[in-house]
Amino acid sequence: MGIKILQQSKSQKQKAEAYILFAKAADMGNLKAMEKMADALLFGNFGMQNITAAIQLYESLAKEGSHKAQNALGFLSSYGIGMEYNQAKALIYYTFGSAGGSMMSQMILGYRYLSGINVLQNCEVALYHYKKVAEYIAEKLERSEGIPVEKVRLTEIPENLHSNSGILDWDIYQYYKFLAERGDVQIQVSLGQLHLIGGKGLDQDYYKALYYFLKAAKAGSANAMAFIGKMYLEGNDAAPQNNATAFKYFSMAANKGNAIGLHGLGLLYFYGKGVPVNYAEALKYFQKAAEKGWPNAQFQLGFMYYSGSGVWKDYKLAFRYFYSASQSGQPLAIYYLAEMYSTGTGVLRSCRTAVELYKGVCELGHWAEKFLTAYFAYKDGDIDSSLAQYALLAEMGYEVAQSNSAFILESKKAKIIEKEKMYPMALLLWNRAAIQGNAFARIKVGDYHYYGYGTKEDYQTAATHYSIAAHKYHNAQAMFNLAYMYEHGLGVAKDIHLARRLYDMAAETSPDAQIPVFLALMKLETVHLLQDIWFFNFTMRWKWIQLDNNLGSYWDLFVIGLIVAALMFLLRNRYR
């Protein structure tokens, strides 16, 4: 009953009622209810965070063979949250969790073997773990059970409070609703899509989605017609599964040349839904939709050539279509590309490429919902709850979660980790995010070594990290920092000319850097000028001392006499 309420609830009050039922079931010894309560106590659902109580529950569950408990204890040991910081113990817990069927443990082990975290780096072992999780995710995606993942970067919020990296502000949502009611067709379709998938932080609501699509379709929107067809094809509470209705709306959209409608008709003929199976017709519609750039149609063509459905198997053609679809982020296309790279089918085998692709698919799992709950907890000031959720996602290899966890630790507002461990842990997480290509994290690693946060001061290492961020990611901040180090000879050989060049590059790369660069160059040139003047005075004084020694103290009168004699000689010659 608790799970049913939790799945159907839209308000916090209803969700709280579900946890009351979980608590009752847990008291009666129900293991699944105990797992739910332990998670709530760990992550602070509804403000009930209690790490000590969560650990007690998890340890009790672990003895009963709960793989979720094994995974949680591994996570807590890995960070030293409420338990001793012990990476060896964490690895044992993750191994048991993985053996018991925990997808999260599988993913964590995959990331550890990929990156060589407390284990020997081993691509093949990483491939084994990621492949298992990716298969599980792909199966759900094929049943259209994927969820949109909104990943808010906390590092970007102070710079732009209105961006929120994909979370739709309530005021903006109300404004969009107003525009939709006024007849803005594009907004109607957009709101329909958001409610259909539950994107931008909005709740999934099929009734609202259908409402907006019907309004837009009535106004002649081909996209809206196609989405109504999709809803009836897949079936939900608002639009019960109906192949005939799906065919009708897909046809209406396709007649307007709409790619989604053409793809929908292709699906109906491919799977024989409401019409006889006809691969030739399916191929025709998929090709038309793919030509218009619709990634789902490109994937479907790739799958037909990969599996030999209605066409001769052609792995090279399948690879081409999968690759095109993957460039638009089509998750199943990415999965099949990973399959091809992992087995060397139609392409040269590459373990590393396969692992990276599988990892991308794995990151679409239902656990990614924690990005939203972690963000809202942070926004509401519940720092410990936010950190616990981001830290778990960071452990699973999410780069955004790694930088967010490091950002929270750096602020020293969290209470679940000891203060003296915060900077070393933040440095570890910034470094992991930097390895995954985050330029801001790379600069942070440089800063930590420059100032000695969580490690000893090391200008040389700091300069190395700034150099990577400057040359690989063309980051203006890194260029500025590196220029400063060359100007003062910190960790690198002093080079004023290179410092000038790096300052100029920083100004060229970002308009925001122009004022700091102008001030830095003014200071550099002023100091350089003063040094030149001082050097000139010193040189002249040295020369005068040398002349005094060689020509006597009246050498200057002798030189003046020579000059006068020379002038007289010139004048005499002129008047002749």
Image (tube, rainbow, N blue to C red):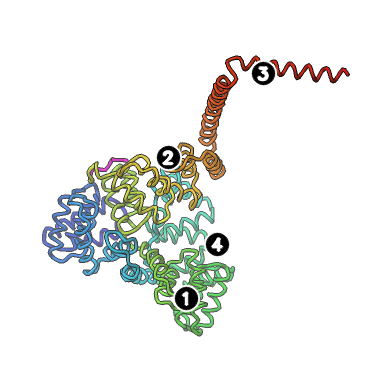
Which badge, 3 or 4, comes first in the chain's sequence?
A: 4
Marks 2 and 3 in Cβ contact (< 8 Å): no
In space, the residues marked 2 and 3 are separated at their CA atoms by 47 Å
Q: Residue at x 46, y 41 (%)?
A: 481
Residue 137 against residue 501 in the figure, above or below: below
Image x and y of residue 203, in percent: 37, 55
Which badge, 1 or 4, comes first in the chain's sequence?
A: 4
Task: Categorize mark 2 by other alpha carbons within 10 Å: few (<14), some (14-19), many (20+).
Answer: some
Marks 1 and 2 in Cβ contact (< 8 Å): no
Task: Categorize mark 3 by other alpha carbons within 10 Å: few (<14), some (14-19), many (20+).
Answer: few
Image x and y of residue 522, in percent: 54, 31
Query: Can residue 492 be seen at all in this image of the molecule?
Result: yes
Q: Secondary structure at mark 2?
A: loop
In space, the residues marked 1 and 4 are separated at their CA atoms by 41 Å
Q: Which residue is mark 1?
A: 347
Q: Which residue is mark 2?
A: 490
Q: Which residue is mark 3?
A: 559
Nearer the observer: mark 1 or 2; the answer is 2
Q: Secondary structure at mark 1?
A: loop
Residue type (three-letter) at the residue carrying disc 4 = Ser
Task: Categorize mark 1 by other alpha carbons within 10 Å: few (<14), some (14-19), many (20+).
Answer: some
Task: Categorize mark 4 by other alpha carbons within 10 Å: few (<14), some (14-19), many (20+).
Answer: many
Task: Please state, as top left, top right, bottom left or bottom right, where the C terminus lies in the image.
Answer: top right
Q: Which residues are magenta?
A: 411-415
Q: Residue furthest right?
A: 576
Residue type (three-letter) at the residue carrying disc 3 = Val
Which badge, 4 or 2, comes first in the chain's sequence?
A: 4
Q: Residue at x 22, y 57 (%)?
A: 87
